[in-house]
Amino acid sequence: MILSDRDIRNAILRGEISIEPFNKSNLTPNGYDLTINEIYIDGKTVERAVIKPMTWFALSTLEYIKLKNITAQLWIRSTYARKGVVASFGKVDAGFEGCLTLSSFNTYQEIELKKGDRFCQIVFEKMLSTPSKYYEGKYRSHKTIKL
């Protein structure tokens, strides 16, 4: 079951979801737009970059996410998909907490990215039951790009 904006607000109040910092204008009818914190390109981390065609890059989200009995999917914003950016996103597991690292590839035209730009949407899903084990992987609790 996908959570609506109303469901997301209620899940935050119940402590099932935490998004820090939370910006109410990033809340969508069925998700939340995540913003760029850092950009990793050409072996360095920057807050602003011009991404040339046929270039791989990674981003970290400004938002620190915590999920309890909720999982999530990530979807690139159509603004970037229309410009030729493709991204490989994994499932965000129940129990995950931290900033997300997003692996992306620019296929078509030069684009500019900067800290604070909305890049993808996180769509939250309610689990039917409590998992027997929460996420405890190596990407838990990080705040910067982790490759």
Image: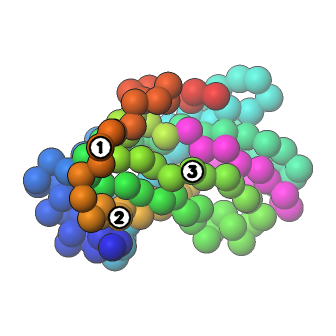
Q: Position of residue 44 (x, y in %)?
A: 71, 23
Type of residue at label 3?
A: Gly
Q: Which residue is mark 3?
A: 90
Residue of label 1: 132
Q: Residue at x 44, y 36 (%)?
A: 99
Instruction: Identify the mark nearer the N-term, 1 or 2.
Output: 2
Do labels 1 and 2 touch, CB within 8 Å?
Answer: no
What amino acid is labelled 2 in the image?
A: Glu
Residue 3 occupies quadrant: bottom left
Q: Looking at the figure, which quarter contains the N terminus?
A: bottom left
- Residue at 33% across / 39% down in the picture? 134
Q: Residue 137, percent across and down?
A: 46, 29
Q: Residue 44: which numbered mark, if any?
A: none
The prevailing secondary structure element of the residues shown in magenta is strand
Write down the residue under mark 2: 125
The spot of residue 126 in percent (x, y) is: 29, 64
What's the magenta region?
101-113
Determine if residue 27 is in view. no
* Residue at the front extreme of this rendering: 132
* Nearer mark to the viewer, of 1 and 3: 1
Magenta segment includes 32: no
Q: Which one is in front, 87 or 34?
A: 87
- The amino acid type, in three-letter code, at marker 1 is Ser
N-terminal of the pair, mark 2 or mark 3, is 3
In the image: residue 50, left or right of residue 20:
right
Q: Residue at x 78, y 64 (%)?
A: 84
- Are the two marked residues, 1 and 3, in contact with CB atoms closer than 8 angstroms? no
Q: Residue furthest left?
A: 14
Q: Position of residue 144 (x, y in %)?
A: 50, 27
**Quick check: 60 above or below 110?**
above
Q: Is residue 112 above or below residue 124?
A: above
